[in-house]
Image (tube, rainbow, N blue to C red):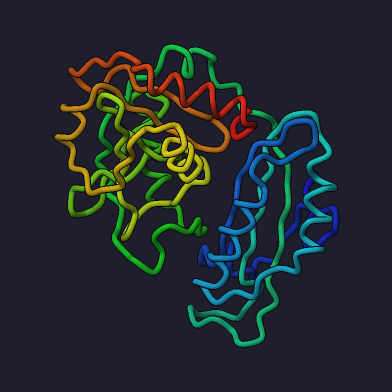
Amino acid sequence: MTLIDGQPTETISVADRGFQYGDGLFETMAVEKGIPCCLTEHLERLTRGCLRLGIPKPAPALLQQEIQTVAAIERGVLKIIISRGAGGRGYAPPFDASPTRVVADFPWPDYPAGFREEGIETFLCETRLGRNQRLAGIKHLNRLEQVLGRAECAEKGMPEGIMSDTDGNLIEGTMSNLFLARGNRLFTPALTSSGVRGIVRSRIIRLAKMLGIDVSVTRLDPSALSHADGAFFCNSVLGIWPVRRFGDRRYSIPPVIRRLQRELIERGVIC
């Protein structure tokens, strides 16, 4: 089901700025037995993004009602899109724009179970992420860098790739956040100028601290991959995918990663 401004339709105006310029935001989350996982955190990030871009935030009660309607499924993926709405030609945002709301469900992706259990092979994408502190952290609709990164994954036949910024710092996966493990310590890239502050990433940072696992949010260059005992990708739908190979480097799956997988499932953070 797809609701656009509360109406069941899949048609949107060609003048919508989300379509024309990527002028908007989105959230993607897992749904289990009609309940969107981590909904509060997703809506909080959506609100922060609206404030950052100067888009009026949707009325909470209205959006919640639409989410409840669309999320009435056994298992799947829920996507929320908020664009600035229709506007005239040109980049300048209209003063009287009326934001467009889209709430839609999608089938659960059939990723192989082995990705979570045995890990995946990955690589460093040639496509680099631009640096812009005003856009860093939020999930805006401008995703051409990720589109190009996903195309590289398809060309190499790998399920995920690592993206760095134009300064060469490791940032994230093409559709996920990145963590490295060394002993009982976790390292994840600082996202001050690029990348998305993922909901599961934030949950992992908080959970790790509760479990006595040290977490460093820091600048990482590609050499950090050579010194790590393990690595993993995470997001709200795929959960945790351990990395078993990066180039010539083979990784085991350290106990700290297995522990996080179990804890996140038990706490309902990932499905």
Going by the image, does 213 lie left or right of 109? left
Residue 76 occupies which quadrant of the picture? Answer: top right
- Write the residue at 78% across / 56% down: 64
Residue 11 occupies which quadrant of the picture? Answer: bottom right
Going by the image, does 125 lie left or right of 69? left
For the N terminus, the quadrant is: top right
Residue 33 versus residue 136 in the image, above or below: above
Expressed as whole percent of the image width and height from the top left, the position of residue 238 reads 53, 30
- Write the residue at 44% across / 19% down: 258
Expressed as whole percent of the image width and height from the top left, the position of residue 120 reads 38, 19
The reply to whether residue 266 is visible in this rendering is yes
- Write the residue at 43% across / 57% down: 137
Residue 236 versus residue 12 in the image, above or below: above
Residue 271 or residue 23, whichever sits in front? 271
Residue 236 versus residue 157 in the image, above or below: below
Expressed as whole percent of the image width and height from the top left, the position of residue 208 reads 43, 35
Q: How many marks?
A: 0
Residue 121 or residue 256, whichever sits in front? 256
Going by the image, does 199 lie left or right of 124? right
The reply to whether residue 20 is visible in this rendering is no
- Write the residue at 42% across / 26% down: 159
For the C terminus, the quadrant is: top right
Going by the image, does 65 lie left or right of 25? right
Expressed as whole percent of the image width and height from the top left, the position of residue 206 reads 47, 43
